[in-house]
Image (cartoon, grey):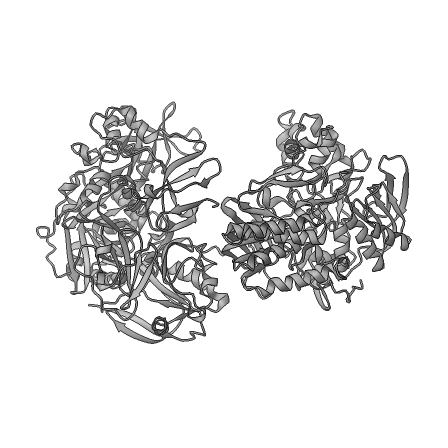
Amino acid sequence: MKDIQRVSPVVFKATPLKTEKRNNWEVVMEYSGEGEGPYLVDLSHKPRFDFQDADLAARKPFGIRIPEIYGGSALENGVLANRMNRTQVSLYCIDGQDNTVIPDEPGFTDVTESTMFVALIGKEVFSICEKLTALDFLDPQRKTPFLFQGPFSHVPCQMVTLSRDGDSSGIVLTCSRGYGRDMIHAVINAGEEFNLKPAGENRFTKWIKSL
Amino acid sequence: MNRFNHLPTLKIDTTQKISFIHKRKKIYGVKGDTIATALFSNGIRIFGRSLKYHRPRGLYSLDGESSNTLMEVDGIPNVRCENTLLKEGMVIKEQNVKGSAENDILGFLDKLDWMMPAGFYYTVMHKPAKLWPIAMKQIRKAAGLGEISPEFKMPGKFDEIFLNTDVCVIGGGPAGMMAAVSAAKKGLRVILMESRPWLGGCFEFRSKEHQNRLSLHERAAQLSKEVESLKNIRVFTHASVVGTYNNNLVTGFQIGKEKDAFDERYIELRAKSVVVATGCTERPLIFDNNERPGVMQAGCALRLAKTYGQLPGKKAVFSIGHDFGLETALELHDLGLSIACIADIRDDGQDPALLKKIADKNILLLKGWVAVKAHGRKVVKQVSLSTIDGSVTRKFSCDLLVASAGMTPVTGPITVAQGKLKYDNHTGFFLPDAMPEKMHAAGRIIGLDDPLSIEASGKLAGLKAAFDCENGSIQEIGQAKKDLENLPGPVRGTKLVTAPVKGRKSFICFDEDATLKNIKQAIAKGFDVPELIKRFTATGLGPGQGGIPGHNLPLYVAKYQALPDISIKPTNVRPPLVPTLISTYAGAGHQMLKITPMDEMQRKDGGVFRNIGVWQRARYFSNDFSCKNEIENVRTNVGMLDGSTLGKFRIFGPDAVKALQRVYVSDMSKVKEGRIKYSAMCTDDGCVIDDGVVVKQGENDFYFTTSTARAGQTAEWIRYHTRYDGWNFAIVNLTDAMGVINISGPNARKVLQKVLDIDLSNEAFGFSEYKEFKIQDTVPVKAMRLGFMGELSYELHVPSSYMKSVWLMIKEAGREFNIQNFGVEAQNVLRMEKCHIILGSESEQRTNLLDVGLGFLWDRNKPEAKTVGAVALRQAEKDQTRLKLVGFKMENNTRAPRDGSLIVDTKVRGYVCTARDSFSLKEAVGMALVEAPLSKIGTRLEIFEDECGNNRIYGMVTQMPFYDPDGKRMKM
Amino acid sequence: MALIITCPVCGKRNGYEFKFGGEEKGPRPDETDLTPKAWCDYVHMNHCVAGVQKEWWCHKDGCGSWFTIYRDTTTNLERQVQKADHQEAEK
């Protein structure tokens, strides 16, 4: 019998320098030629959950509070909670929570497998975004972190803007897993003029800890 | 030619030569040249030939108002040479010529204009009827500008950008820059779009005094510096607006500079408020041969010198109707142009300071005179001038005739956004009357000419735009308004369109070779309004988008019909306001398609992929598109299919069953754990739109599948039909979360048993049963026993990231049985032999559940569920006029008809859904939707294939299913 | 697309992100004693107002909600948005 391996929908044309085995995923910690930024990091191995409940105000999934405003996000204990609407919140375990298992409650659905998940980090991030979507990431009315549910490169996505602060600007983005190949192609292509390069998880961890 | 290199307004660098090829000859321009100015500097006066009459055409304007200077550049036809910067090595060719632009064999057509009156192709050569197809071919050959081969592939990099801003300013002249600055100073986000490669507008090339001894071009530099110093203004130069729409959507395109990553990019912009400060172009003066090379507009002549460092001619005659014309004459005179005469349309009203200078320099000025004819076979050699009434004429020799009747505001961005214009008797302009919501006009577009007024109007518009963004005060706006009112208002404009000529060779529209005579012909035929005349004569329908005739046509039509001013109406303009490449609209053109988790492995196995909906799927696994081997392998051995594109959903919550009852026709309260429920969804009309299976995962917790095509709409469908009910249920789309492998064939159990350690016997895991288990204690799998292909079959739903490992395991386990891939086409044939339908193949929009024989799924005893489609199905039950799905086989063992072929007798009776030469049955079979009377077993079907003429083929209605009618094989 | 629609969850968005759901006609009628004509009227008859109408939209590329807006069919501009109407839109 073969080894069981999990495969990310995100494939970069870059050579991994350092990798780490985690829950059957082969996570790339660093790529060769990551450059000076902006960076594109694959986070598809990080657990993600959909949580739905008629009374969200009364619920604290993973013990964290759910943002009250629709489209609001909050990062707490390494879990990013994004309020999608009255009854629904998406939960991304982005910082050191890779072993999180699904709580035994009916409201949760594991959607790790449903989407591809990447981070775009660096000061040119929004110049890349405006080539791919009409969504206004720089809208002064929104306060970071905040969620967009809308098209990115014509495909419906969830995007969370975590920072709009110069070099530490960055967003995380999920879209249907099947679009992984073409989405990465579109983002890399749009970012080429800004020297966007694939980067390993270390870049992401460093960034998320700096926020 | 020697170029000026000392003028402060120059945009060229004469020290940097650029070589390019024109007519196979290497010639030189300089850095900063457009293709047009580089050609002109090489003494080239004839750029191409006109569309209809093959008249010589040359440089007339510099902003691309006409098709005169469209040329083929590097194989790309119809490049706007006035707007395209020269690049090293460009290969330029003339268009619409037989021979050369200089000596065009088709030049004789100019003498045959009497054969081609306005709209001639509507009226002549239609009788006898046989003549037209021949004539049409010749006309088509002659018509159109530029040539392109079907193999041509557009070179270059194209991109797109989507912008959001508070204020968008269209036009980077003085008014636009003032508007941008005053809005930006409020802290707003501002985008400034300018179609030329630099800011400055009508100030940028002029030496006239602004105030306090500052020249206009110095003032332009001052303003553009201020714009650049403000971080919240984003400037897009060489960026033209092509459309403006409601809710302040602005679209345009930008031409890239050398360091840009794109050659051209599409711009889509959403603003809270828009300022239109697009200024004016010149209104052409119409006289005989008014488009002869050597005739050009005042701005063109002046900018050739001041921007591009070359004199437009040696000896000039001016025929103008505005002070800008006089200013141009003086500036060019100072630069060394000899001026034979200035004819000014106006008897009086000129700026006295300009008149004094003209007198001081001894230039002959004739007031109340106008050019009536340009002489010279190919280029201007002489000009006849006459008094406005035509009573006195004089001739002057010259090589340049600067002709300009007046100014014309560029109002396109206002009118395409549904703003209204009104004819203004003072200026002779169509001025903005009713502006669209949150759009403001400023500068020359509202008739202003005084530099300070232009700037003040820009400031006012900027403040109004800021106010739209809830920033600023009424008081401020009031003050700015007062400031503007204290400055000079609009100047009186000339209204003369044409010199006193008959008009046979007086061109109102260059692009379409439309003359004044043509306009008269159209009016004589009863086309009395400009909008109709425009269409009948094609005036303004060319690539210049009405830039030349847009203003003159309504003025002339009004005058010719002796209409009062009040009824002069401009023709409509539509996007694109400026023509550009289709490639620019295509932009980066990212292909966004989904791939399944097995994509990589299937490609390695030789899969032939096709785009099916949003997915790329392996349709075949060899070049034999009949899929014989793939099909036989499933029937006799075992095959594996990627079914990952199926829609997959979780629905749960206290009201989940109610929601399922609403959309599925069956009684969904009867779904049992461990069993698969097959059911269908209908529209309110009972038309079947989806089928799939539902399994129960827990209390009020279901997992269901939909067809590939419906996956994207299912959640929204369920929510739509329950939108009033306030039910508490949740849906999660898991389509991409799970890959699906279908293992089918008599050996399927043997292969799977090697991978799984659960009991797979028919007793333990029977047909239509559902199981959940883990592979190697790790991979969670949902397994179903279905029989779509009519064989023993297992469908495994596996988390996508694990799919590769599971796929490889099964392949390895199947090696000893010689397991093979099969693709979507093989599946299509296999299921057709079994008469299992695919919605969309065996149904179309009007096909209902009963038509396709799925009526057994419908449970009529749940009216409280208000099932979508139930009411309509009850009515349809009694309807005998509907089509029925039948199976048929071909007579005399002939081949299968093509899908979609018609079933006919004296009229159309139905159509073939799917039909194939079946390898399993050794005959051609298929399914068809036919009228009820034809659905009886044994009925002969007459089949009409596309282009079959009188040769019909015949089939016979037969029992369904064709293969394994007892269904034993799938229950093995 | 020039159309802008205000999604009660996501705010003002480009019309491309939405799917039209028809005029507001009220809840589905009861099936018992429903005449074919009454049913057909509910499903297919529209008012086709030249002016402001209340209609359903789904934010299909965004949050997925169904909700109503008022739109002027002569200008294709959204008109006043009333908060109370969105309760039914919430999932």
Which of the 4 image quarters holds residue A34?
A: bottom left
Up/down of B212 relative to B387, above or below: below
Which quadrant of the figure contains the N terminus of chain A?
bottom left
Residue lying at the far front in this picture: please name it: B475
- Count of picture labels: 0
Residue at x 27% of width, y 43% of height: B718
Q: Is residue B599 placed above or below A37 in the rendered structure?
A: above
Q: Residue furthest left?
A: B763
Q: In the image, what residue occupies the spot 64% across and 27% down? A: B126
From where the camera sits, is residue B208 visible? yes
Which percent across, then down, holds residue B449? Answer: 72, 49
Q: In the rendered view, does A101 fall on the left or right side of A211? A: left
Query: Where the C terminus of chain A falls, by quadrant?
Result: bottom left
Q: Quadrant of residue C68?
A: top left
Report whether B930 appears left or right of C73. left
Instruction: Looking at the picture, tell me which residue is in the foreground, B534 or A94.
Output: A94
**Looking at the picture, does residue B961 appear above or below residue B75?**
above
| Residue B116 in view | no
Residue B66 horizontal side relative to residue B957, left or right: right
Q: Position of residue B19 (x, y in %)?
A: 70, 64
Judging depth in this view, the residue of B645 and A105 nearest the camera is A105
Q: Give percent across and percent down for residue A21.
A: 26, 73
Location of residue B306 (image quadrant): bottom right
Residue B298 percent location from the top left of the image: 77, 50
